[in-house]
């Protein structure tokens, strides 16, 4: 699944081509996504895209009339292409611009979404209860520490809760915990303030580095321009179970937490 850095890279990739452009019309080839494409989606036709932002893993294309919410789901990609580009399998939605370009969503598993919202976007059910953005000033070690008190859930599961902080998905939770020296199985409420200070710093640094390096290469994700990301070359633990720790040479172990893979070093992470 594309994580926050991949979605942010996508946002930055489409922004120069879409921001300030007028929408000609939309094309819906398959409305059956994670949630059905909004029946009134045609209302976006004639609107001007005034802002392109990201909240968690949602892309938000704002107009004066409303906001288009896009989510890539498990396997979705968004490309900026010429409007006459031939349609391929799983091309479910087109946002056709008056410039002659088209924003096209391809989603083989159809776990993504395309929603048209005319109310205050911050009050929408998908957005309203989300935690702070990890790269914002709202996300602090003090905030994370206070939210963790008396929590018996494992620290990795705690980090991946979007009500606590958004966008710290499986890859980056693994990496941040390793760099902070924290065992992913440890109860969130038993992690010290000192460790939360380091963890917050690592989350910010690792996500920032991933964004700058183009996102992590996953088997079902490519950037908007079709080029793969490069951050995967810098991963310390994710996907390296059974290999030697790059720090101490201990064999990395793998466990399952909330149906997700956790890889850690039994020596470096306590």
Image (cartoon, helix red, strand yellow):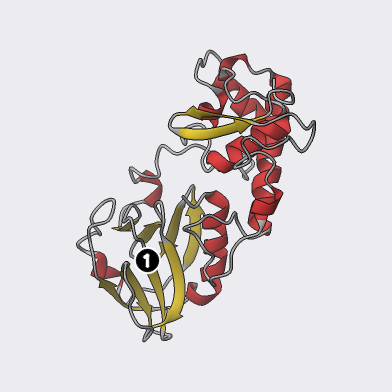
Q: Quadrant of the C terminus?
A: top right
Q: In the displayed image of the protein, which residue is found farthest to the left?
A: 39
Say which residue appears at 53% left-offset and 54% top-offset: 218
Vertical arrangement, residue 129 with respect to residue 36, above or below: above
Q: Residue furthest right?
A: 248
Position of residue 169 measured from the top left corner of the image (x, y, whole percent): 53, 41
- For mark 1, does the 10 Å Cα neighbourhood hold few (<14), some (14 to 19), or many (20 or more) residues? many
Return the x and y of residue 57 as percentages of the image width and height: 47, 50
Query: Who is closer to the viewer here, 15 or 172?
Result: 172
Residue 5 vs residue 80: left or right?
A: right
Is any part of residue 160 visible from this angle? no
Q: Residue at x 67, y 50 (%)?
A: 208
Q: Residue at x 39, y 41 (%)?
A: 128
- Whether residue 188 is visible to the viewer of this picture, yes or no, is yes
- Could you say which is closer to the camera, residue 179 or residue 43? 179
Please give the count of numbered marks on the rendered protein: 1
Give the residue drawn at x 39%, y 71%. Answer: 104
**x and y percentages locating residue 160 in the rendered image:** 51, 34
Q: Is residue 134 left or right of residue 86?
A: right
Quarter-of-image position of residue 228: bottom right
**Residue 56 placed where, x, y %?**
49, 47
State whether residue 170 is above or below residue 51: above
Of the pair 164 and 243, the residue shown nearer to us:
243
Q: Quadrant of residue 251?
A: top right
Q: Nearer the viewer, residue 213 or 197?
A: 213
The image shows residue 245, relative to residue 2, as above or below, that is above
Query: Which residue was labeled with disc 1?
Result: 106
Q: Secondary structure at mark 1?
A: strand
Q: Quadrant of residue 81?
A: bottom left
């Amino acid at each position: 699944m594309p994580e926050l850095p991949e979605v942010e890279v996508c946002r930055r990739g489409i922004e120069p081509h879409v921001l300030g452009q007028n929408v000609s019309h939309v094309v819906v080839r398959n409305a059956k996504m994670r949630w059905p494409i909004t029946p009134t989606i045609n209302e976006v036709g004639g609107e001007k895209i005034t802002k392109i932002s990201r909240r968690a893993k949602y892309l938000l294309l704002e107009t004066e009339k409303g906001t288009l919410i896009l989510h890539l789901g498990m396997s979705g990609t968004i490309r900026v292409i010429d409007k006459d580009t031939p349609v391929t399998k799983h091309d479910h939605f087109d946002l056709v611009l008056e410039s002659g370009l088209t924003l096209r969503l391809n989603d083989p598993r159809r776990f993504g979404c395309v929603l048209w919202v005319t109310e205050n976007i911050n009050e929408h059910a998908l957005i309203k209860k989300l935690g702070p953005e990890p790269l914002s000033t709202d996300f602090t070690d003090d905030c994370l520490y206070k939210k963790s008190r008396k929590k018996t859930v494992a620290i990795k599961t705690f980090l991946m809760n979007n009500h606590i902080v958004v966008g710290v998905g499986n890859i980056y939770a693994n990496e941040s915990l390793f760099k902070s020296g924290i065992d992913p199985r440890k109860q969130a409420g038993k992690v010290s303030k000192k460790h939360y200070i380091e963890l917050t710093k690592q989350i910010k640094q690792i996500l920032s580095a991933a964004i700058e390096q183009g996102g992590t290469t996953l088997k079902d994700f490519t950037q908007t321009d079709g080029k793969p990301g490069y951050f995967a070359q810098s991963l310390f633990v994710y996907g390296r179970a059974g290999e030697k720790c790059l720090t101490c040479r201990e064999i990395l172990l793998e466990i399952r937490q909330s149906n997700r893979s956790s890889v850690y070093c039994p020596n470096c992470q306590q």
